[in-house]
Image: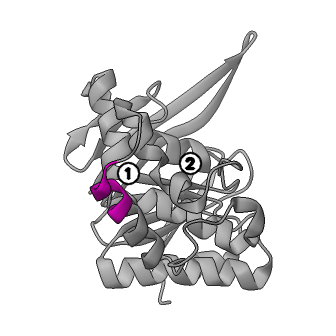
Amino acid sequence: MIRLESLTKSYRDGGNRFDVLRGVSLGVEEGELVAVMGASGSGKSTLLNVIGGLDRDYGGSAEVLGRDLSKLGDRELSRYRNESVGFVFQSFNLVPPLTVLQNVLLPGYFEGGGGQPAAAARSSARDALARVGLAGKEGRLPARLSGGERQRVALARALFRRPRLVLADEPTGSLDAQTARDVIDLLVELNVKERLTVVVVTHDEQVASRARRILRLKDGLLVDDREHAR
């Protein structure tokens, strides 16, 4: 599903160059749950951004779902991000005035159709909420939800288009220990029951221990890649 070959990424700050990824090569098969670990600045989030099509300025090769991301035009890349990949971040990125259902429907609005979502879209959004255990809370506002429930809404939004791949960047970073376990349990359940491919960036060893594989980055290099019995 994911094939990265000699992936490089650099930033410039004035006259200085910073190498964030230095020749990273790896593969992720369909149905895997993979954790990516490393210190701050090791390249974890940058790696996820390349896989998700959020960062196009890189060297090497990034192929996802059989497509070379560097060869996709703007419209194709936008469609890839909206339909093939679901994103979950540490900050829930929910819109406060919108209900739970409306927040889940947001990807549909950004497709360009605007206006009132079709009945089919609403049905898909309700289904996504049911998959994360939030059936019956469609009309609530984010302010009336717990932190764990808000992250579940964010996950439901990521699942709205039924993507084959979910990329989660520190999804438990803002949660207490028990709520973090609940959220990662949900990701594991979706991975096992639906063969959803999940790549999760985390600094939490407990979260990483639930993955089948753990990748470790250090100074932009892949220094460890091992199977893990969860």
Identify the secondary structure beneath mark 2.
Answer: strand
Write the start and end of the magenta stretch as one range: 118-124
Amino acid bearing label 1: Val
Q: Is residue 121 in the magenta section?
A: yes
The residue beneath circle 2 is: 221
In the image shown, does 167 or 79 lie closer to the viewer?
79
Q: Which mark is residue 85?
A: 1
Identify the secondary structure beneath mark 1.
Answer: strand
In the orientation shown, which residue stands out farthest toward the bottom? 230
User: Which residue occupies 28% across, 57% down?
Assistant: 120
**173 with respect to 151 (left or right):** right
In the orientation shown, which residue stands out farthest toward the top? 15
Q: Give the image location of residue 109, x and y in percent.
A: 43, 39
User: Which residue occupies 38% across, 41% down?
Assistant: 81
Quadrant of the drawing holding the N terminus: bottom left
Q: Main secondary structure of the magenta part?
A: helix
Q: Is residue 120 above or below residue 72?
A: below
Q: Is residue 194 above or below residue 36?
A: below
Amino acid bearing label 2: Leu
Query: Which mark is in front, 2 or 1?
Result: 1
Residue 100, picture quadrant = bottom right
| Residue 53 seen in the figure | no
Q: Is residue 230 in the magenta section?
A: no
